[in-house]
Structure formats: structure tokens, C-alpha cells
Amino acid sequence: MSATIETALRRAVEDAAADLYVWSLKDIPSDLRDALGAALERETHQVGRRILETIHTNVAVADEGKRLVCQDTGIAVYYCRVGEYFPLHPARIYAALKAGTERATVEHPLRSNTVHTLTRENTGANVGYRVPIVHWDFVPGWDGLDVKCVPKGSGSENMTFLKMLVPADGVAGIKRFVLDAIVDAGGKPCPPGIVGIGLGGSADYAMHLAKEAIARPVGSRNPDPLVAQLEAELLELINQTGIGPQGLGGVTTAMAVNIEWAHTHISQLPVAVNMQCWRGERACALIDAGGNVTYPD
Ligand code: SF4
């Protein structure tokens, strides 16, 4: 590959990272906008309605002024699907994502949340050791790059739960654990949002799956009918808790329950729960081998 193409691709990935980080904080995806509208329509609880109306005003003010929807700029997390023939090595993609994150933070400017875990010293640019966090998937026979930015705010990210159930706990045990997590979390993850659940794999992989699940659009269903049925049953149970918008009561505590799963060990049943707040920060870019960038919704 010529140095010119490599420079153009690095620049395209860096620009896309900078755009995605800012857009994911300013623009709520259309599926979430629709789901927030539907939540307001069906809300019967007086305080729940008032909270949802305030959320709608918040979104309108952010749209009008092109402002951030919430002050928490999260921690930069990207999901990359790299085509087998995409002509930029993942090490260089990572460097470009990091440069884009830093540039967005400094130039916008965005609040920097990234600190040393022990000293709590702020790096000032939302990057640091192993930050941004990047997850990789490799796609055979393709020459493109798909980047999704999902910067989780801490209110929702702190409400994360993992349990290694035993197989005898079964589906009833999964439901009990998820409902306990929702009740423990209450209003802290800024409901109504998306409840992401990772089932199976190992402890670390279950958590990875839960995080993948929160990045799936509202209204999508897991392709496995058994898992899709569990998604629907859990959504109904969660909304029966009455926790409601911001935890102040109401009929919508979650707008969606999304489950991702993997096979697991004969003696394990890992279950992870990760919550996404109503803001649902998420933005995607598609970059082709020539460095052309498109932004699907
Ligand atoms: S949980 Fe979401 S809406 Fe609530 S403060 Fe954090 S980023 Fe903002």
C-alpha cells in the first residue's frame, strides 16, 4: 500500500472517530427517539409523565442548540468490524481512533472524564492507558471497516452486574438475577433505557456480550426464538417493577431488553447485566478501502 493511501485512511478513521464521539453525545438514535415518544404516550403515572416530558424537552433543547444531550461524555468505547482486506492494520486503526478521541475532546471541547484509576489524575483528553477501549471483530472476504462508538456515562455503567449461576438455576435463576439487578439499580442508571444481558461464554465474555447487547437498536430481536422470547418476558417483568422514569415511578423502566448469548461450559451459567440510560449514546461509521466515510443511522 502506498504511503499516500495509508495517510488518507488514517486520517479518515481519525476524523470518523472524532465525529462519532461528538455525535453519539449530541444526537439520539431514531429508534430511541421513537421509543421515548411511545413511553410518554403510554405513561399513566403522573411523576413518570413529567419526567418523560422533561426528557423530551431536554432532547429538543440539545437538538436546537446542537448541544450535548447530557453532561457526561462517558468513556470512549469503540466496536470495530474490520474486513479481511481493509488496507490499514488494526494497530494503526487503534492509533487513529485514539487521536480522533483526543482531538474531539480538545477541539469541541468535551469534558474529560479519563483519570488514572489509583491516583485519579485526569489525562485531560479522554484517552489514557488502554483508553479508548476498542473491541475487534474480523470479517472474512470484505475490504471495509465498520466503527461504532458507544461512550457509556457512569450512571448507567456503574449499574453493571455479573453472576456465575449454576446450571440448576436455569431460566428462573436468570430472571431472578436480572430483576434483582434492576431493583438494586433503581433510578441510578437514568431509566427508561436499554437493559443489556449477556448469557453464557465465560465471565469476561458474558460481560462483553451484555455490552454488545446495549448497542443494539430498540425493537430489534435476537434471531434465536428462545432468546427472543426471554427478551420479551424480561421486558414485561422489568416494567412491572414500577421503578419508572428516573426511578420515580411509572410503567416504563426499560424500553428494551436485548440479550446476546454464547455457548458455555457444562457446569457454568454466566449472566451479565449492563444498562444503557435513556440517552442511549451510539453512533456508527462505515469506511471503505478508499477512505470514503458514510454514517448510517
Ligand atoms: S446515566 Fe446517562 S443520562 Fe444519566 S447522567 Fe449518566 S450519561 Fe447522563
Image (cartoon, rainbow, N blue to C red):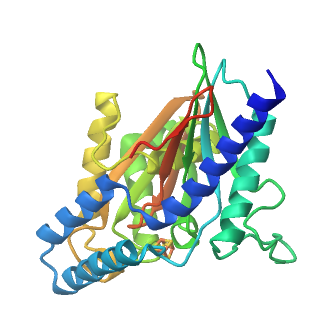
Q: Residue 171's image quarter? A: top left
The quadrant the N terminus occupies is: top right
Residue 194 left/right relative to 238 = right
**What is the residue that sits farthest to the top in this orientation?**
141
Observer able to see residue 89:
no
Question: Is 234 placed above or below 135 here?
Answer: below
Question: Is 24 placed above or below 17 here?
Answer: below
State the residue in front, 115 or 225. 115
Q: Residue 202's image quarter? A: top right
**What is the residue that sits farthest to the right in this orientation?**
119
Give me the residue at 42% from left, 48% from top. 174
State the residue in front, 192 or 242. 192
Please state the horizontal and vertical placement of residue 271, each as a whole percent of the image: 52, 46
Residue 258 left/right relative to 142 = left
State the residue in front, 207 or 219. 219
Please state the horizontal and vertical placement of residue 270, each as a whole percent of the image: 56, 42
Observer able to see residue 145:
yes
Give me the residue at 60% from left, 21% from top. 143
Give me the residue at 70% from left, 54% from top. 100
Please state the horizontal and vertical placement of residue 267, each as a whole percent of the image: 59, 32
State the residue in front, 131 or 24. 24
Residue 134 left/right relative to 151 = right
